[in-house]
Image (tube, grey):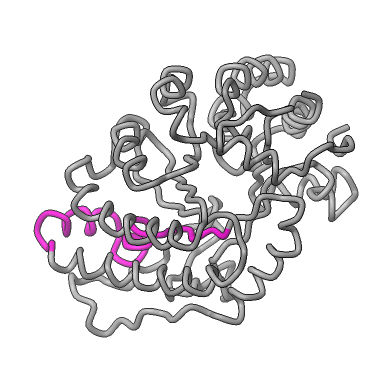
Protein backbone atom coordinates (compact mmCIF):
# COMPACT_ATOMS: atom_id res chain seq x y z
CA UNK A 1 0.00 0.00 0.00
CA UNK A 2 1.17 3.54 -0.77
CA UNK A 3 3.72 2.83 -3.49
CA UNK A 4 1.58 1.39 -6.27
CA UNK A 5 1.82 3.59 -9.35
CA UNK A 6 -0.78 3.17 -12.06
CA UNK A 7 0.30 3.63 -15.66
CA UNK A 8 -0.33 7.23 -16.71
CA UNK A 9 -1.83 8.37 -20.00
CA UNK A 10 -0.21 11.81 -19.62
CA UNK A 11 2.95 12.79 -17.78
CA UNK A 12 2.81 14.23 -14.29
CA UNK A 13 4.39 17.41 -15.63
CA UNK A 14 1.60 17.80 -18.19
CA UNK A 15 -0.95 17.35 -15.42
CA UNK A 16 0.61 20.13 -13.31
CA UNK A 17 0.77 22.43 -16.34
CA UNK A 18 -2.92 21.78 -17.00
CA UNK A 19 -3.75 22.58 -13.37
CA UNK A 20 -1.79 25.85 -13.46
CA UNK A 21 -3.50 26.79 -16.73
CA UNK A 22 -6.91 25.90 -15.25
CA UNK A 23 -7.54 23.35 -17.95
CA UNK A 24 -9.62 20.16 -17.63
CA UNK A 25 -7.85 17.36 -15.73
CA UNK A 26 -8.14 13.59 -15.69
CA UNK A 27 -7.19 13.76 -11.98
CA UNK A 28 -5.54 16.22 -9.63
CA UNK A 29 -1.75 16.48 -9.40
CA UNK A 30 -0.30 15.81 -5.96
CA UNK A 31 2.89 15.99 -3.95
CA UNK A 32 4.01 14.05 -0.88
CA UNK A 33 6.02 16.72 0.96
CA UNK A 34 8.11 15.28 3.81
CA UNK A 35 10.61 16.52 6.36
CA UNK A 36 13.95 14.72 6.39
CA UNK A 37 12.99 12.87 9.60
CA UNK A 38 9.70 11.63 8.16
CA UNK A 39 11.40 10.62 4.91
CA UNK A 40 13.89 8.51 6.88
CA UNK A 41 11.08 6.91 8.91
CA UNK A 42 9.17 5.96 5.75
CA UNK A 43 12.32 4.55 4.13
CA UNK A 44 12.57 2.20 7.11
CA UNK A 45 8.86 1.39 6.98
CA UNK A 46 8.97 0.47 3.27
CA UNK A 47 12.50 -0.98 3.57
CA UNK A 48 13.26 1.05 0.46
CA UNK A 49 15.54 4.11 0.29
CA UNK A 50 14.01 4.97 -3.09
CA UNK A 51 10.38 4.71 -1.97
CA UNK A 52 9.65 8.37 -2.73
CA UNK A 53 10.19 7.92 -6.46
CA UNK A 54 7.42 5.28 -6.44
CA UNK A 55 4.74 7.44 -4.81
CA UNK A 56 3.76 9.22 -8.04
CA UNK A 57 4.49 12.69 -6.67
CA UNK A 58 4.26 15.26 -9.43
CA UNK A 59 6.92 17.83 -8.49
CA UNK A 60 10.69 17.58 -8.75
CA UNK A 61 12.20 20.06 -6.30
CA UNK A 62 15.77 21.15 -5.58
CA UNK A 63 16.56 23.55 -2.76
CA UNK A 64 19.20 26.27 -2.88
CA UNK A 65 20.14 25.75 0.78
CA UNK A 66 23.67 24.59 1.50
CA UNK A 67 24.73 23.34 4.95
CA UNK A 68 28.14 22.44 6.35
CA UNK A 69 28.27 20.12 9.37
CA UNK A 70 29.57 21.58 12.63
CA UNK A 71 30.29 19.88 15.97
CA UNK A 72 27.54 19.00 18.46
CA UNK A 73 24.57 18.68 16.12
CA UNK A 74 25.01 22.06 14.48
CA UNK A 75 25.21 23.15 10.83
CA UNK A 76 26.37 26.33 9.10
CA UNK A 77 24.39 27.67 6.15
CA UNK A 78 25.81 29.56 3.18
CA UNK A 79 25.15 32.93 4.85
CA UNK A 80 27.28 31.86 7.83
CA UNK A 81 24.35 31.31 10.19
CA UNK A 82 24.86 28.40 12.58
CA UNK A 83 21.78 26.32 13.33
CA UNK A 84 21.51 24.08 16.38
CA UNK A 85 19.50 21.08 15.21
CA UNK A 86 19.37 19.32 18.56
CA UNK A 87 16.12 21.13 19.38
CA UNK A 88 14.17 19.83 16.37
CA UNK A 89 12.25 21.85 13.81
CA UNK A 90 12.84 22.05 10.06
CA UNK A 91 16.21 23.71 10.31
CA UNK A 92 16.84 24.00 14.04
CA UNK A 93 17.44 27.16 16.07
CA UNK A 94 19.75 30.05 15.17
CA UNK A 95 22.69 29.91 17.56
CA UNK A 96 23.87 33.51 17.24
CA UNK A 97 22.66 36.41 15.10
CA UNK A 98 25.43 37.74 12.89
CA UNK A 99 24.12 41.32 12.70
CA UNK A 100 23.70 42.43 16.34
CA UNK A 101 23.79 46.08 15.24
CA UNK A 102 21.92 47.88 12.47
CA UNK A 103 24.94 47.91 10.17
CA UNK A 104 26.42 45.65 7.51
CA UNK A 105 30.03 46.60 8.23
CA UNK A 106 32.08 43.53 9.06
CA UNK A 107 29.68 41.11 7.37
CA UNK A 108 30.43 39.62 3.95
CA UNK A 109 27.53 38.37 1.86
CA UNK A 110 28.09 35.04 0.12
CA UNK A 111 28.41 34.51 -3.60
CA UNK A 112 26.24 31.77 -5.13
CA UNK A 113 27.90 28.36 -5.21
CA UNK A 114 27.70 28.04 -8.98
CA UNK A 115 29.04 24.50 -9.13
CA UNK A 116 26.47 23.20 -6.64
CA UNK A 117 23.61 25.15 -8.22
CA UNK A 118 24.43 23.68 -11.62
CA UNK A 119 24.52 20.17 -10.16
CA UNK A 120 21.05 20.69 -8.72
CA UNK A 121 19.76 22.08 -12.01
CA UNK A 122 21.15 19.08 -13.86
CA UNK A 123 19.30 16.77 -11.47
CA UNK A 124 16.09 18.65 -12.22
CA UNK A 125 16.68 18.41 -15.96
CA UNK A 126 16.96 14.64 -15.65
CA UNK A 127 13.42 14.58 -14.26
CA UNK A 128 11.81 17.28 -16.41
CA UNK A 129 10.36 14.94 -19.02
CA UNK A 130 8.12 13.36 -16.37
CA UNK A 131 7.74 15.85 -13.50
CA UNK A 132 7.14 19.60 -13.07
CA UNK A 133 10.49 21.07 -11.99
CA UNK A 134 11.00 23.75 -9.33
CA UNK A 135 14.14 25.40 -8.03
CA UNK A 136 13.53 26.61 -4.48
CA UNK A 137 15.10 29.66 -2.93
CA UNK A 138 14.09 29.31 0.70
CA UNK A 139 14.42 32.01 3.34
CA UNK A 140 14.24 34.31 0.35
CA UNK A 141 13.75 37.74 1.97
CA UNK A 142 12.17 38.38 5.37
CA UNK A 143 13.25 35.05 6.78
CA UNK A 144 16.82 35.41 5.54
CA UNK A 145 16.98 38.91 7.03
CA UNK A 146 15.76 37.85 10.47
CA UNK A 147 18.06 34.83 10.59
CA UNK A 148 20.91 37.36 10.34
CA UNK A 149 19.42 40.10 12.52
CA UNK A 150 16.75 38.36 14.72
CA UNK A 151 13.04 38.86 14.17
CA UNK A 152 12.41 41.39 16.98
CA UNK A 153 15.33 43.57 15.85
CA UNK A 154 14.36 43.38 12.18
CA UNK A 155 10.77 44.39 12.93
CA UNK A 156 12.11 47.34 14.94
CA UNK A 157 14.43 48.18 12.03
CA UNK A 158 11.37 48.48 9.78
CA UNK A 159 10.33 51.38 12.03
CA UNK A 160 13.52 53.01 13.34
CA UNK A 161 16.39 51.82 11.10
CA UNK A 162 14.65 51.88 7.75
CA UNK A 163 17.71 52.70 5.63
CA UNK A 164 19.53 49.71 7.08
CA UNK A 165 16.52 47.41 6.61
CA UNK A 166 16.22 48.41 2.95
CA UNK A 167 19.95 47.86 2.42
CA UNK A 168 19.87 44.44 4.09
CA UNK A 169 16.90 43.24 2.04
CA UNK A 170 18.42 44.67 -1.15
CA UNK A 171 21.67 42.77 -0.62
CA UNK A 172 19.71 39.54 -0.03
CA UNK A 173 17.77 40.22 -3.23
CA UNK A 174 21.01 40.71 -5.15
CA UNK A 175 22.17 37.27 -3.99
CA UNK A 176 18.85 35.72 -5.04
CA UNK A 177 18.99 37.36 -8.47
CA UNK A 178 22.51 36.05 -8.98
CA UNK A 179 21.27 32.53 -8.16
CA UNK A 180 18.38 33.02 -10.58
CA UNK A 181 20.76 34.06 -13.36
CA UNK A 182 22.45 30.65 -13.11
CA UNK A 183 19.25 28.62 -12.80
CA UNK A 184 17.63 30.47 -15.70
CA UNK A 185 20.20 28.96 -18.05
CA UNK A 186 18.31 25.66 -17.66
CA UNK A 187 14.85 24.78 -18.95
CA UNK A 188 13.30 24.52 -15.47
CA UNK A 189 9.59 25.14 -15.03
CA UNK A 190 9.39 27.36 -11.96
CA UNK A 191 11.09 29.23 -9.17
CA UNK A 192 9.70 28.47 -5.71
CA UNK A 193 10.33 31.24 -3.18
CA UNK A 194 9.98 30.45 0.53
CA UNK A 195 9.33 33.28 2.99
CA UNK A 196 6.96 33.13 5.97
CA UNK A 197 5.01 36.37 6.43
CA UNK A 198 1.88 35.14 8.19
CA UNK A 199 0.72 34.43 11.71
CA UNK A 200 -2.31 32.33 12.57
CA UNK A 201 -4.27 35.56 12.10
CA UNK A 202 -2.82 38.25 9.86
CA UNK A 203 0.67 39.28 8.84
CA UNK A 204 3.69 39.42 11.12
CA UNK A 205 4.63 42.92 9.94
CA UNK A 206 1.28 44.16 8.61
CA UNK A 207 0.45 45.06 4.99
CA UNK A 208 1.97 48.60 4.88
CA UNK A 209 5.42 47.43 5.99
CA UNK A 210 5.22 44.35 3.74
CA UNK A 211 4.47 46.60 0.79
CA UNK A 212 7.33 48.94 1.65
CA UNK A 213 10.05 46.40 2.38
CA UNK A 214 9.11 43.07 0.77
CA UNK A 215 6.97 43.79 -2.28
CA UNK A 216 9.55 45.79 -4.32
CA UNK A 217 12.10 42.97 -3.95
CA UNK A 218 9.54 40.32 -4.83
CA UNK A 219 8.78 42.25 -8.00
CA UNK A 220 12.43 42.07 -9.05
CA UNK A 221 12.54 38.30 -8.51
CA UNK A 222 9.16 37.58 -10.06
CA UNK A 223 9.99 39.78 -13.08
CA UNK A 224 13.25 37.89 -13.65
CA UNK A 225 11.45 34.54 -13.51
CA UNK A 226 8.79 35.72 -15.95
CA UNK A 227 11.40 37.20 -18.30
CA UNK A 228 12.88 33.70 -18.53
CA UNK A 229 9.51 32.07 -19.24
CA UNK A 230 9.24 30.45 -15.79
CA UNK A 231 6.31 30.11 -13.42
CA UNK A 232 6.45 31.63 -9.93
CA UNK A 233 5.50 29.71 -6.79
CA UNK A 234 5.45 31.43 -3.39
CA UNK A 235 5.41 29.73 0.00
CA UNK A 236 4.26 31.48 3.12
CA UNK A 237 2.86 29.87 6.22
CA UNK A 238 0.12 31.73 8.06
CA UNK A 239 -2.64 34.09 7.03
CA UNK A 240 -1.53 36.19 4.06
CA UNK A 241 -5.02 36.70 2.61
CA UNK A 242 -4.51 40.49 2.64
CA UNK A 243 -1.71 40.04 0.13
CA UNK A 244 -3.38 37.90 -2.54
CA UNK A 245 -4.28 40.93 -4.72
CA UNK A 246 -0.68 42.20 -4.46
CA UNK A 247 0.77 38.78 -5.29
CA UNK A 248 -1.52 38.38 -8.28
CA UNK A 249 -0.52 41.87 -9.44
CA UNK A 250 3.15 40.82 -9.23
CA UNK A 251 2.47 37.74 -11.37
CA UNK A 252 2.28 34.89 -8.85
CA UNK A 253 1.12 31.60 -10.37
CA UNK A 254 1.14 29.10 -7.46
CA UNK A 255 0.55 29.77 -3.75
CA UNK A 256 1.61 27.34 -1.04
CA UNK A 257 0.60 26.36 1.77
CA UNK A 258 -3.14 27.23 1.94
CA UNK A 259 -3.91 26.18 5.53
CA UNK A 260 -7.58 25.28 6.23
CA UNK A 261 -7.17 26.23 9.92
CA UNK A 262 -6.64 29.80 8.72
CA UNK A 263 -8.57 30.21 5.49
CA UNK A 264 -12.09 29.47 4.37
CA UNK A 265 -10.49 27.60 1.50
CA UNK A 266 -13.67 27.33 -0.57
CA UNK A 267 -14.28 31.09 -0.30
CA UNK A 268 -10.66 31.94 -1.18
CA UNK A 269 -10.81 29.54 -4.11
CA UNK A 270 -13.94 31.32 -5.34
CA UNK A 271 -12.27 34.73 -5.02
CA UNK A 272 -8.86 33.95 -6.52
CA UNK A 273 -9.05 30.46 -8.01
CA UNK A 274 -9.18 31.69 -11.59
CA UNK A 275 -5.87 33.53 -11.12
CA UNK A 276 -3.91 31.37 -8.65
CA UNK A 277 -3.13 27.69 -8.32
CA UNK A 278 -3.24 26.55 -4.70
CA UNK A 279 -0.66 23.98 -3.58
CA UNK A 280 -1.24 22.40 -0.18
CA UNK A 281 -4.49 22.46 1.74
CA UNK A 282 -4.25 19.10 3.58
CA UNK A 283 -3.74 20.13 7.19
CA UNK A 284 -0.60 18.99 8.98
CA UNK A 285 -1.54 21.08 12.00
CA UNK A 286 -4.73 19.18 12.82
CA UNK A 287 -5.92 16.64 10.25
CA UNK A 288 -2.85 14.57 9.41
CA UNK A 289 -1.34 14.83 12.88
CA UNK A 290 -4.49 14.19 14.95
CA UNK A 291 -7.25 12.47 12.95
CA UNK A 292 -7.85 8.79 12.26
CA UNK A 293 -7.08 7.50 8.73
CA UNK A 294 -10.77 7.29 7.73
CA UNK A 295 -11.25 10.93 8.71
CA UNK A 296 -8.14 11.90 6.76
CA UNK A 297 -9.52 10.24 3.65
CA UNK A 298 -12.97 11.75 4.10
CA UNK A 299 -11.69 15.30 4.61
CA UNK A 300 -9.22 15.02 1.75
CA UNK A 301 -11.89 13.95 -0.71
CA UNK A 302 -14.09 16.87 0.37
CA UNK A 303 -11.20 19.32 0.01
CA UNK A 304 -10.22 17.98 -3.39
CA UNK A 305 -13.79 18.35 -4.65
CA UNK A 306 -13.92 21.96 -3.44
CA UNK A 307 -10.51 23.08 -4.62
CA UNK A 308 -10.06 20.91 -7.70
CA UNK A 309 -13.09 22.23 -9.61
CA UNK A 310 -11.86 24.13 -12.65
CA UNK A 311 -8.22 23.22 -12.09
CA UNK A 312 -5.82 25.35 -10.12
CA UNK A 313 -5.07 22.88 -7.33
CA UNK A 314 -2.09 20.67 -6.42
CA UNK A 315 -2.99 18.30 -3.57
CA UNK A 316 -0.35 18.34 -0.84
CA UNK A 317 0.08 18.71 2.90
CA UNK A 318 0.16 22.30 4.13
CA UNK A 319 3.75 21.78 5.22
CA UNK A 320 6.35 19.08 4.74
CA UNK A 321 4.91 16.32 6.91
CA UNK A 322 6.65 16.44 10.32
CA UNK A 323 7.59 13.39 12.34
CA UNK A 324 4.50 13.50 14.57
CA UNK A 325 2.22 12.33 11.72
CA UNK A 326 1.34 8.62 12.04
CA UNK A 327 2.42 6.43 9.15
CA UNK A 328 -1.18 5.20 8.79
CA UNK A 329 -2.23 8.78 7.99
CA UNK A 330 0.53 9.16 5.42
CA UNK A 331 -0.68 5.94 3.80
CA UNK A 332 -4.24 7.32 3.89
CA UNK A 333 -3.02 10.44 2.08
CA UNK A 334 -1.34 8.31 -0.59
CA UNK A 335 -4.39 6.08 -0.97
CA UNK A 336 -6.61 9.05 -1.74
CA UNK A 337 -4.33 10.82 -4.21
CA UNK A 338 -3.22 7.66 -6.00
CA UNK A 339 -6.75 6.28 -6.43
CA UNK A 340 -8.65 9.25 -7.79
Q: Nearer the viewer, residue 171 or 6?
A: 6
* Quadrant of the drawing holding the C terminus: top right
Q: For this view, does 270 lie left or right of residue 29?
A: left
Name the residue rendered at 56%, 59% in the picture: 86
The location of residue 6, given as percent across then percent down, is 88, 35
Name the residue rendered at 46%, 35% in the picture: 276
Q: For this view, does 200 lie left or right of residue 49?
A: left
Name the residue rendered at 48%, 58% in the picture: 138
Tell me where residue 10 sits by quadrant: top right
Based on the picture, tell me whether residue 312 belongs to the magenta stretch.
Answer: no
* Quadrant of the drawing holding the N terminus: top right
Name the residue rendered at 33%, 73% in the picture: 98
- Height in image: 210 above or below 240? below
Q: For this view, does 114 lie left or right of residue 121?
A: left
Based on the picture, tell me whether residue 141 belongs to the magenta stretch.
Answer: yes
Q: Nearer the viewer, residue 257 or 135?
A: 135
Q: What's the magenta bit mostly, secondary-structure-wise?
A: helix
The location of residue 325, given as percent across then percent down, is 67, 34
- Height in image: 74 above or below 238? below
The location of residue 122, given as percent across then percent down, is 69, 70
Magenta part of the chain: 135-162
- Height in image: 264 above or below 185? above
Q: For this view, does 146 lie left or right of residue 181?
A: left
The location of residue 190, given as percent across then percent down, is 55, 54
Amino acid sequence: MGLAAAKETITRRERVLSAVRHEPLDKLPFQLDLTDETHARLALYFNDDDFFEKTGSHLAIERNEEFTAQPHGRVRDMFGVIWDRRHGGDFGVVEQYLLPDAALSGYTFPAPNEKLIREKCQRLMCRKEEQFTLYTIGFSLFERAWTLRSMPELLMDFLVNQEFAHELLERITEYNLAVMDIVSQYDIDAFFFGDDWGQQKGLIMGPPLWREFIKPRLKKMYDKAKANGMYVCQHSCGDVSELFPDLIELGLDIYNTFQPEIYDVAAIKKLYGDKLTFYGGVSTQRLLSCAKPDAVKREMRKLMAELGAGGGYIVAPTHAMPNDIPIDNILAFLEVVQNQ
